[in-house]
Image (cartoon, rainbow, N blue to C red):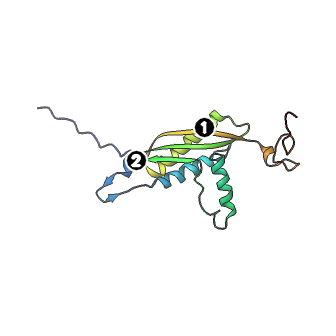
Amino acid sequence: MADIPKTAPTPPTPARLADDTAHGKTTIAASVVQKIAGIATREISGVYSMGGGVSRAFGALRERIPGGAGTTNLAGVAVEVGEKQAAIDLDIVVEYGASIVELARAVRRNVIGAVERMTGLEVIEVNIAVNDIHLASEENAPDGTSGQVGPATPSARVE
């Protein structure tokens, strides 16, 4: 009978790090993955904010409430976390002028890298929905209309 050559054991992949070990089990809450993904998304230049219009409005309200500014805003980040894998959905608002395709690639790369490095989970997908484009004039309009085009009160189209 021929000897079967022994191969060196392969090092554990990042997805394996969250497995059971002889010394215990590590579990990672979905909120942890959610925070990591949100922070990694905001690190990319060209991402103005996260979330849809309603979640951004609630986030702005939360910042005005005493003690609300200290809470982490998870608007715009949804995750599904299993024992070894995670899937992430992001809703973002981009700065006008940014290449959305390049921005999405950078966000996806940064989120995958951060989540896999910090948690050991394999990120199987990062879905990005661009909900709006932010114009610099929306905040800095000289007439105080927040960048609104036209008169402050809409006029009737027909009489």
Closer to the N terminus: mark 1 or mark 2? 2
Seen as rendered, the residue at the extreme front is 159
Up-down relation of residue 5 to residue 43 (above or below): above
> Which residue is depicted at the point 67% across and 64% down?
65
The three-letter code of the residue at mark 2 reads Gly
Residue at label 1?
104
Counting other residues with Cα less than 10 Å from the Cα at mark 2, is it few (<14), some (14-19), or many (20 or more)?
Answer: some
Helix, strand or loop for disc 1: helix
Helix, strand or loop for disc 2: loop
Give the x, y percent position of residue 154: 84, 41
Location of residue 11 (image quadrant): top left
- Who is closer to the viewer here, 70 or 40? 70
* Quadrant into which the C terminus falls: top right
The three-letter code of the residue at mark 1 reads Ala
Residue at label 2?
82
The dot on residue 5 is: none
Give the x, y percent position of residue 87: 47, 43
Counting other residues with Cα less than 10 Å from the Cα at mark 1, is it few (<14), some (14-19), or many (20 or more)?
Answer: many
